[in-house]
Image (cartoon, grey):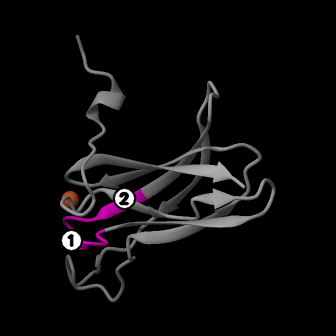
Amino acid sequence: MTARLGERIQQADWKKEKHVPVIECPDEVQAGVPFEVHVGVGKEIAHPNTTEHHIRWIGVYFQPEGGKFTYDVGRIDFNAHGESVAGPNQGPVHTGHSGTVSLTVSEPGTIYALAYCNIHGLWESSREIKLS
Ligand SMILES: [Fe+2]
């Protein structure tokens, strides 16, 4: 039987594995008050950012505690990786693979980040958010 997509999503300690997205946000927030979630790949061990090998996007999701469904909060696309008419990696711009989304929540839950490397596939991490 074919594996489910979720079984293909890889997990690891971000301090030892360069693909795992690192989630930086408050542990506790107030209901309805905006806060920022910063996500990035390569905080401890740098990931390449070349035309051939790069992080293409990071998605952010929210799962309310006890809720049935997961909500898509936002996705940051990284679209420049040194491509140029002069050839691969000759271009003048490389998008860094980190970014920030702003959100509010009305319930406690879990923030998930999902990162996609064009060679090494899907990687996830998560972080709990409590209400104060
Ligand atoms: Fe990679």
Q: Which residue does the image show at 66% across and 44% down from the upper left?
A: 108
On whether ligand 1 comes within 8 Å of the CB at mark 2, the answer is no
Mark 2 = which residue?
Answer: 21
Classify mark 1: helix, strand or loop.
loop
The residue lying furthest to the bottom in this view is: 92
**If you read the primary sequence from the N terminus, does the residue marked by circle 1 or circle 2 appear first?**
2
Residue 6, above or below 109:
above
Give x and y (percent) for residue 75: 53, 56
Residue 116, above or below 39:
above
The residue lying furthest to the right in this view is: 32
Give x and y (percent) for residue 61: 55, 46
Main secondary structure along the magenta-highlighted residues: loop
Give x and y (percent) for residue 126: 44, 48
The boundaries of the magenta stretch are 42-57
The N terminus lies in which quarter of the figure? Answer: top left
Observer-nearest residue: 8 or 130?
130
Q: CA distance from mark 1 to mark 2?
A: 11 Å
Q: Which residue does the image show at 20% across and 53% down from the upper left?
A: 119
| Crowding near the residue tagged with mark 2, few <14, some 14–19, many ≥20 C-alpha atoms within 10 Å | many
Mark 1 = which residue?
Answer: 45
> Residue 51 in magenta?
yes
Q: Which residue does the image show at 26% across and 65% down from the upper left?
A: 54
The residue lying furthest to the top in this view is: 1
Identify residue type, mark 2.
Pro
Observer-nearest residue: 129 or 69?
129
Give x and y (percent) for residue 80: 38, 74
Which corner quadrant of the figure contains ligand 1?
Answer: bottom left
Identify residue type, mark 1.
Ile
The residue lying furthest to the front in this view is: 132
